[in-house]
Amino acid sequence: MSEEKSLNFIEEIIENDIAAGLHNGRVHTRFPPEPNGYLHIGHASSICLNFGLAKKYNGQCNLRFDDTNPSTEETEYVDSIKADVKWLGFEWHEELYTSDYFEQLYDYAVMLIGKGCAYVDDSSAEEMAIQKGDIGKPGVANEFRSRSIAENMALFAEMRAGKFPDGAKVLRAKIDMTHPNLLLRDPIIYRIKHAHHHRSGDKWCIYPMYDFAHGQSDSIEHITHSICTLEFIHHRPLYNWFIEQLGIFPSHQYEFARRSVSYMITSKRKLLQLVNEQHVKSWDDPRMPTISGMRRRGYPAAAVRQFCDMIGIAKRENLVDIGVLEFCVREQLNKSANRVMAVLDPIKVVLTNYPESQTEHLTADNNTENENAGTRQLSFSNTLLIERDDFMEEPPKKFFRLGPGLSVRLKHAYIITCNEIIKDENGIVTELHCTYNELSKSGQDTSGVHVKGVIHWVNAADAIPAEVRMYNRLFTVEDPANAEGDFKDHINANSMEVNTKAMVEASLKNAAVGSQYQFMRKGYFTVDKDCDASNLVFNQTVSLKDTFAKEMKK
RNA sequence: AGUUCGAUAGUGUAACGGUAACACUACAGAUUUUGAUUCUGUCAUUUCAGGUUCGAACCCUGGUCGAACUACCA
């Protein structure tokens, strides 16, 4: 059952560590989001990695909210993050908050001051930036760097006590103003912010910087493998420096390249912009690359997990084709979604030789890919609706659908032949008159007629109108984040098309929100939460592969 | 400019010194009461140049290209 799969570089590290007996073979990871936005596909990759690793190596994974900046963080985000992680199918060992460590972190800072490894700096942000130097140009020390330990102690205590306004002073680690790694040129570790925190309230007016909180939080939790994205690689020496100075648990950080997906954006700032400026309706708009957006769109959690697994993990830059994600969605839904018939752009078909007053009931299997899916009844009469696309007045050679004199099978029903075309005054086809072959009933066909094409249909008498929201890519370019100009210049104006003329089969009458179907020959669709008693709303989750459409384009 | 990463089919990952694998895509074909699914087949000498070695995608040297880093954000 177990397939031999090669290890990614982090798994290799972990297995080596286990073999070497590091931390007695214990594996403990964590997923550390900042609660200042909704989780997206990139986070999904990180979640699958961190929780997956813990599971694979019989370890644990914490959910830790990195909430060191009170001005951007909100409880709404905490809730959405928890919901998203759960939906993806993972359970955290402990729900933790960096803000719970504020007292401990303060003590760490005091400890550094006591060792002469930190000082209070009165410089302005501008002054500090200048003193910091530049890439290739060393920084210079200022007069505050040589303050006495006692003075630093007193000042830092006063900072905590609220004696100074925002920005008046900062606490800095005393490392090396000429270090080639800019992050080690005496980084700020505490700043004054008289702001209300979503958890600690007004208890604090000084807050640790991320760099002074993240590594120590990992250490406090005894995280063995602290996994993050590549841009933090320069921070690692700093975290190690703190760990060493403080003499605390040596958590080790490993960095991987964040996954980029074509036609998607994963900058929280930009996603927030899309929402605030109403380019999309909400964080969970089905066009959004957020986990909540994908969930509403109908992407199964298993598909997202499969995707993360398929694209793997490495250290090189990448732009994964969104087609891979869509492949995973189709593969999952192919097994789980029941088939139904829905006509998105209806055209009326009258069967001239079918008794006008007759209605018969046909049996249709729900999903031939799934033995347990069962069957349902379909009503059939002389007036039906078929897809406008499935008829052509002047069809090309390999058009296996309806046209003048052509025959097709109606799925689960009879073979029909088109005899007459009715048009309106503008020459638009409004109705087709066809005859059915009485002997060709699905499952008991004795007609001897063989047709290549099979099309879907609904019975006009009891079909239900539905609103079907069709989605296209949110952006017109593969890599909007790195494209010329502003990313908003590349928003696809037609990313959503609302179809209000669709007609779906009667069995969908009470379809529950979130339930998923394959509209035969069209794609997978998911019932949206915007449904109400009078309006059935579907989101197009993903289309079916359409080889014929591709053929036609050539 | 300095530091640190990285470079393998169109895309993503693998090969752990013994002659490039898997998946997606694309193309070709078979099956099909979904032009879906399923099934077959086709598509690279690994950024370049040297070197070490019987043997290099892998080790060494140098070049080229790409990325990250100069927030009181995370």
Image (cartoon, grey):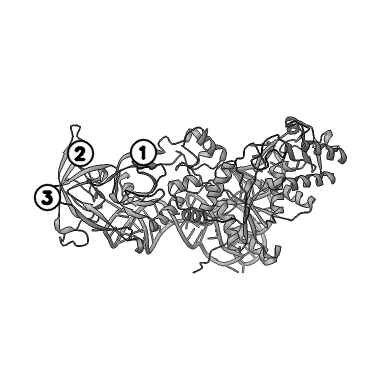
Instruction: Give A407 or A182, whichever is nearer the viewer.
Output: A407
Q: Residue at x 65, y 58 (%)?
A: A28
The residue at which mark 1 appears reads as A498
| Mark 2 or 3, closer to the camera | 3
Q: Position of residue A200 (x, y in %)?
A: 68, 42
Quadrant of the snapshot with the C terminus of chain A: top left
Which label number is shown at residue A195? none
Which residue, as the protein is rendered here, is positioned at the far front? A533
Residue type marked 3: Asn
Q: Which residue is mark 3?
A: A353
Q: Marks 2/1: CA distance?
A: 22 Å
Mark found first going from the N terminus, 2 or 3? 3
Q: Residues within 10 Å of mark 2 (few under 14, many from 20)?
A: some
Pinpoint residue B62: horizontal percent, then vertical percent: 67, 49
Residue ID for mark 2: A430
Q: Is residue A234 visible?
A: no
Q: Which of the two labelled residues, at mark 2 and mark 1, occupies the earlier sequence position? A: 2
